[in-house]
Image (spheres, grey):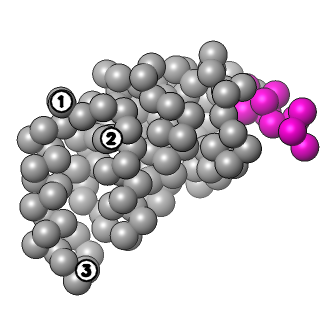
Amino acid sequence: MRSVPHEPLLNSIAAQSIKRMPEFSQQNLANTAWAFAALDVLHVPLQKSIAVEAIHICNEFSPQGIANTAWACARFRLLDHPFLQAIAASSLTRITAFSPQNLVNTVWSVAKLTFHYEPFLAAISAASMPRI
């Protein structure tokens, strides 16, 4: 873990989050992933736990949750194919509900990770075109 002003606090939050991860909603997962990434704190066990749990509830993720979680993975270049595949597949039917910001953040994330899932990329493209 990188040196941060409150490393003991962040380690404690990560440890407790990992223990309670099965109780987390999609928003809890997305917010936790986003918060650690925004602080530039890579806690690998926490990120792996988030990815594993997110696979189980990926159909519950909001567009913003998908964008934020993908951004957090891309921030640290955490290319977790099973997680990204599950999130991408669950997004296909809801991609038109993504706001422009959600689309941009998601596109940036998959580009940064060089994640190629053609149906997902095609869906993002189709949802983006009418908004340009």
Disc 1 element: helix
- The magenta segment: 123-132
Instruction: Provide the major secondary structure of the magenta segment.
Output: helix
- Mark 3 to mark 1 CA distance (whole Å): 27 Å
Amino acid, disc 2? Leu
Say which label, 3 or 1, has the lower sequence index: 3
Amino acid, disc 3? Val
Q: Are marks 3 and 1 in contact (CB under 8 Å)?
A: no
Q: Answer whether residue 118 is visible to the viewer in this image.
A: no
- Residue 23 part of the magenta-drawn span: no
Circle 3 is placed at which residue position? 4
Disc 3 element: loop
Q: Which mark is residue 29?
A: 2
Q: Are marks 2 and 3 in contact (CB under 8 Å)?
A: no
Marks 2 and 3: which is nearer the front? 2
Indicate left or right for 85 with 80 as reference: right
Amino acid, disc 1? Pro
Q: Residue at x 16, y 47 (%)?
A: 17
Point out residue 104 in the picture as x, y percentages from the top left corner.
69, 48
Q: Which of 89/14 is in front? A: 14
